[in-house]
Amino acid sequence: MSPARLPEGADSLPEGQGRRPKGAPLSLQRRLMLYLLLSAPLVWLMAVAVSVNRAQHDVNELFDSELIRLARQVQVMLVPAAGNAKAPAAVVRGAGIGEADLSDFAIAVWDAGGQLYLADREGGELPRRPGTAGFVSEQLHGELWRVYYLPSASGDWLVAAGQKAYERDELVYDLTISQVLPWLLVLPLLLAALAWAVRRALAPVVAIANDLEQRDAANLQPLPMQAAPAELTPLLHAINAQFARVDALLTRERRFTADAAHEMRTPLAVLRAQWDVVRRARDERERGEAQARFSAGLDRMDRLVTQMLALSRVDSRAAAAQTAPWEHEVDWPAVVEQAMSECLPLAERRRIEFACEWPPVPREALPLLGDAELLAVMLRNLLDNAARYAPPGTLVTVRFSRDRLEVENAGVALEPAELERLGERFRRPVGQQESGSGLGISIVQRIAALHGLAVRFGPREDGTGMKVVVRFAAAASS
């Protein structure tokens, strides 16, 4: 694989563009290339070794069969000459042998007395081995021979047929080279094809990397998955899901910033004006009234900041709940105690009594898996609204049953148009004397939805006051 060319006039490329940082791990493409370039020749050599071994076995089998056949044919021809055992040895000479090299073969025959009866030019060198039958490896003049000994059934003759081992090895080498040489010449082309295939196979990865590298920080559009290979689909799903989470986080932060900038501008201006009035007050009565208005403005600012932080926390927890489901069952008595204790100063100021009704034993109060802290914030907002807008000296009741939670007061029933708009951020019903931020109902609805609950607002059974019902969303929709 040839190195990448540098642009003219450039000594090096920036780190991460066209060159690998020093000490960084190899890229996936380079790893695949390295593994293929090492494994392909290794597998090829193993295949050659197996081919040579099989060729050696086949050649030995072929020539061994020929030696056996030759020895048997010679033995058959010797049967009529059994009465002439003392005849002098005859030397067989080849005539018209063509391309054959008879010096690589040998044949010899001995009679029962050990007298050499028949031999060719090389056969006279073969050693006589009485009582031997089968193949034997012999060293003749520093060369290895493969010799087959065949004694006759009567014991009158011993026939030996031999062949140089080099003749067999030469044939094996010729066969192997004739098969291996074309593959050896094609091997560079094979490696080049493998390199091209690796680049083509990793082209989608490179395309994704280039797409991500060219994006700016604000571009969180999902990566296209239509033409992506199946192996990259889980990775693209994970990247797109992460993009969605980051986009939701940035949206929440932008919304929080915009809401804070919008809603805190007016209270800050009012506080500045009220502070100027406090500083310029000429008598104690005027200063006391200005200080009371200034304290009320601070309370409203404190409540606004608290509610906005609570809403931001709910939005953040909603994103985390998508990957980390609830695991703990809610302890409603502890939640009720926490919410009522936080609303107690308001209740005492307005002379509101809190009451809680539980289902009869052994029924369980709204069994639910969730975040007790968030549910305490939800119930606190419901109690805060109920106590803030109930007539002084009345009762606010929290009622639990198997499938719902209810909070009701004895205030003035809202018009249907106002009920429909409950939950809009920073919106409060016209004519309210109590301070507020207009975020409480929105927080309640977000926490309820986060736990699979639905919130419904309406008057009590007698048509007066306000009753809030929190129940499971599936039951509410049915």
Image (cartoon, rainbow, N blue to C red):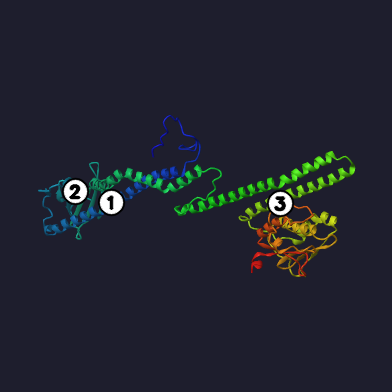
Crowding around mark 1 (Cα neighbors within 10 Å: few <14, some 14 to 19, many 20+) is some
Callout in the foreground (3, 2): 3
- Foreground tag (3 vs 1): 3
- Kindly check if marks 1 and 2 are in contact, taking CB atoms under 8 A apart as contact: no
Residue 341 picture quarter: bottom right
Whether residue 469 is visible to the viewer of this picture, yes or no, is: no
Residue ID at (77%, 61%): 333
Which secondary structure lies at badge 2? strand
Distance of label 3 from label 2 (alpha carbons): 103 Å
Q: Nearer the viewer, residue 49 or 247?
A: 247
Q: Position of residue 323 (x, y in %)?
A: 61, 55
Q: Quadrant of the N terminus?
A: top left
Q: Which residue is mark 3?
A: 310
Location of residue 425 in the rendering, given as x and y in whole percent from the top left corner: 69, 54
Disc 1, SS = helix
Question: Which is nearer the N-term, disc 1 or disc 2?
Answer: 1
Image mark for residue 55: 1
Q: Is residue 315 left or right of residue 115?
A: right
